[in-house]
Structures are given as structure tokens and as C-alpha cells.
Image: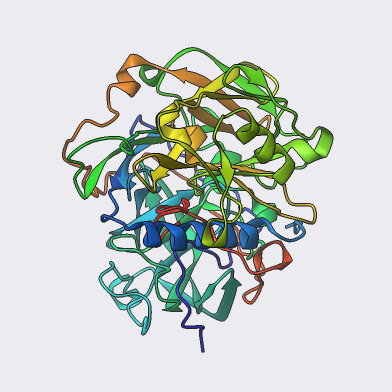
Amino acid sequence: MLSSSTLALSYLLIVLPNVFAAPHVVPAAGQSIPLIRRTQPERTVADWELWAKNEREVLTAKYGGNVEKRSTGTNLLTNQNADSSYYGTVAIGTPPVSFNVILDTGSADLWVADQACTTGCSKVQLFNDLSSSTFHNLSEPFDIQYGSGAAEGSLGQDVVQMAGFSVPNQIFGTVTQATSGLLQPPVSGLLGLGWQSIATSKATPFWQTLASSGAWSDPVMAFQLTRFINGSNVNAAEPGGSFTMGFLNSSLYTGTIDYQSLPTTPSYWILPMTSLTVQGSSVTIPSGSSSYSAIDTGTTLVGGPSSAIQNIFAQIPGSQAGTGNWQGYWMYPCNTAVHVSISFGGPSWPISPADFQLTKISSSQCVGAFFELNTGGSAPNWIVGDTFLKNVYSVFRYNPAAVGFAALSNTATAMNGVNAAPPSPTIGSISASATAGTGGSNAASSRWGVPWAPLVGGVFVALGAAWM
């Protein structure tokens, strides 16, 4: 039985194949993947406290153990829970059915709620294996434990499509039980965009099958995320930006992409944080491997070593450490516009004061979006989420492995806070496909050797009230 304890935000895992068969590639055509953003309901200070506590605990669980070795298209995104999480759509089966999934560079597995789900799956789109002529039941159970919850079900194999790309035999998890709060409607699951080495299944992720097979025109995927956290009259769902595969959308950034190579064998998308400034003053941060930062689209905030976070707030007059559920967070005067910039070895990238401010808890006191996080083991010390990523055009390159950033264009920033109809799920024609080989699975495992869960939303993406 699964724990009944609630979880705000998080997702996890399953199993996929770990080798490729010879891919069949068709010339690619340019397409885009819209992202969707949904606003969160009005929260009381008490609600924010619980959300913050959950965000901290979930991220600690996600990154708190030892690392296990383990053509073109665009998907428009939806912004959910006031910048808490961003989701896009994938289509599964024959005929294809679309599902909203969190796009998470901090994990590497695909899973969706199944029609047989008995707990934790209400009001979301469910996968019906009986309706797909190409579904194959692998008859392998899985049981994933994470932070404050769990999910379980079985493994299946079917056609998975996204942004004009298709993998005809993708292995994914079909969830039949989930901890209450794990799935926040209308999101049905999660698509991991990290490397195979961190897949709980030890299998090849959807994106990596495409990138390694040559199905993409260029071996890159990129994000542009919108900001609504400081908007007014925000609707329940807003345009969230875009996620592209196989190309870069030059209309969304200016200048050149500054690529920084991954310092370790690919697992998470890790970069060393080389400098950090607050209010124009440099603050002391750890160096060497202690500076490693996971660039995580599935996390809302920025978590880092206690000493570094304390140094950040030491530059902000009137700051004070939080207590109780706010432990690890810091308060500061709301009338102070906090300017933070981060460098990962190249340019210093500024973060908007609007993104630094997580929420207001009184007429004069606000909570910062940087918080103390102790990951432990060989996990990266910093988890850099959407608080930072909303301020840059971010690129994740397969070969040579690197993460790149560029300044957002006026076209991109003009989308911030502008109410408009969110993108609708669409199922387009397939322009390229790649076949994944069959591989072994590890159906009952937990990430990093410990329970984990991605954040998204409310604070998870921090992830969201339920998707922290």
C-alpha cells in the first residue's frame, strides 16, 4: 500500500530500454512544442509555509543520495501555478492520445497515470492500454518511493510521439496508485529529459533515443519559459513558452549561445557555478566539485549550500532566517529589489528581482527564492531551477555534452505576463522516428539510491502546490 501522506509536487520514475536498435530516420520538419502555465489558487501564509517545507524536503529527497550510474520540433508549454511548473504534451498509442506531462531535465523516465489507477489519479487524463493497438504489456511491476510519497504500477511499451518525433517502442510506466497530491490536474505524468545514467529504469530516455540516432537536425533541445509570478489578473492557464528539439529558435534569444561543457560523465545536466553576485557584490561560494549545479527545469526555485545562501542574504539589509516550516528559507524587506547574477564559467546571467521574490508573507516581509539545501553524497550541491531559467534561453546539447545560455530577445520577454489562450494539445504528423532497443529494467528502485521526487510548481517546481 502506498503512504497516504500528501506530496506537493514531484514525480518519478520507471523503466526503459538501455540500448538502441538501428534507427530508421525520416527527414525532419520544423515544429514547435508550446508550454503551458497554470496559476495557483490564492494561498494563505500557512499554505505557503507548508509548501515551502515540502519543497525543501522533496528536493532533498530527489538529490539527497549517491548518484547511480545509471529534423526539429517545438512543443508549446503551459505555465502552471504561477511559474511553479511548466508542462507540455506527448501522445501515446495507436491511435495517439495526448497527455500533459511535466518536462523535467532533472530526471530521466517517462510515466503516465493508467486507467486502472485507483488512488491519486482523479481528474487527469488516463492511459487506456485497451484503446491502443500497439501497446505491449511488459508484465513487469514497479514501485517507486520518493520523498513523501510513492507511485506504483507496471511497465508498458508503445508508440510515443512529441513535436513531430516518434519512438515506436518506448518503454514507460503506467501508474495505478499514486500518493495523494502527486498528480496535479491537468498533468498526467512526467517526461524526464535527463541522461540514461540517472534513469531509475536504467533505460534510454525518449529524447536520448532521438538525439543519438541522428533524428534531430542538430543535437540540441532548448527552453524559453514565461514569467507570470508578478502578473495581475492571471488566468488558471497561461502560455508557458516553448520547448524545441533538434534546433534553436533564433527569434527567442540574442547574441550567441554560451556553451559550457559538462564537468562529469553525463547524468544530470551539471555545470560548475563559478561566481555569484548580490546587489553588485560578489559573495563567497564553494569551488571545485562543491560548486556543481544541476540545471533542472523540473524545479521551481534555487537550492544551495547553507553557507552560500547565508552569504547571499548577508548582502540584503534586514534579512533574517526563517524558522519552523520556513527553516532553510530567508525573509527580507519587500521594498528591497534584490539583484542576483550567476556565472557558470562564461557571462554573468542576471535574475529579475521579481523571480527572486518567492512570496509576500506580510505587508513588509517577503520570502526569497534561494533556500538552503543539503543534498549529500555525490549529488550536486546546487539545484538551479526556474527562478533562474526564466531569465535565459537555455540549451541542452547532446554532443558534445554541454549546457548553453543566451540572453532572451524582446520577442521572448514580451510574452511575460501577457494573458492569452494557453496552447491546446495537438497531435501532428511524424517527421522523424527512431527505434529504441529493448533493455533490462529495475522496476523497484529509487533515485540516487534514496526516495526522490521532482519538483514542479507551487514551490516545487518548487514545485507547485502539488507539483512543487
359 or 436, which is in the foreground? Answer: 359
447 is higher (above) or lower (below) than 299: below
140 or 269, which is in the foreground? Answer: 269
Is residue 9 among what the camera can see?
Answer: no
Residue at 43% x, 41% y: name it: 366
Q: Is residue 52 left or right of residue 22?
A: left
Q: Is residue 245 left or right of residue 143?
A: left
Furthest residue toward top = 255
Residue 402, position in %: x, y? 65, 30
Furthest residue toward right = 288
227 or 406, which is in the foreground? Answer: 227
Residue 197, position in %: x, y? 70, 53
Residue at 31% x, 57% y: name it: 43
Residue at 74% x, 51% y: name it: 379
Residue 59, position in %: x, y? 59, 56
45 is higher (above) or lower (below) than 277: below
Residue 460, position in %: x, y? 47, 54
Q: Is residue 350 left or right of residue 83?
A: right
Is residue 88 among what the camera can see?
Answer: yes
**Quadrant (top left, top right, bottom left, bottom right) of the C terminus:** bottom left
- Tell me where residue 251 sits by quadrant: top left
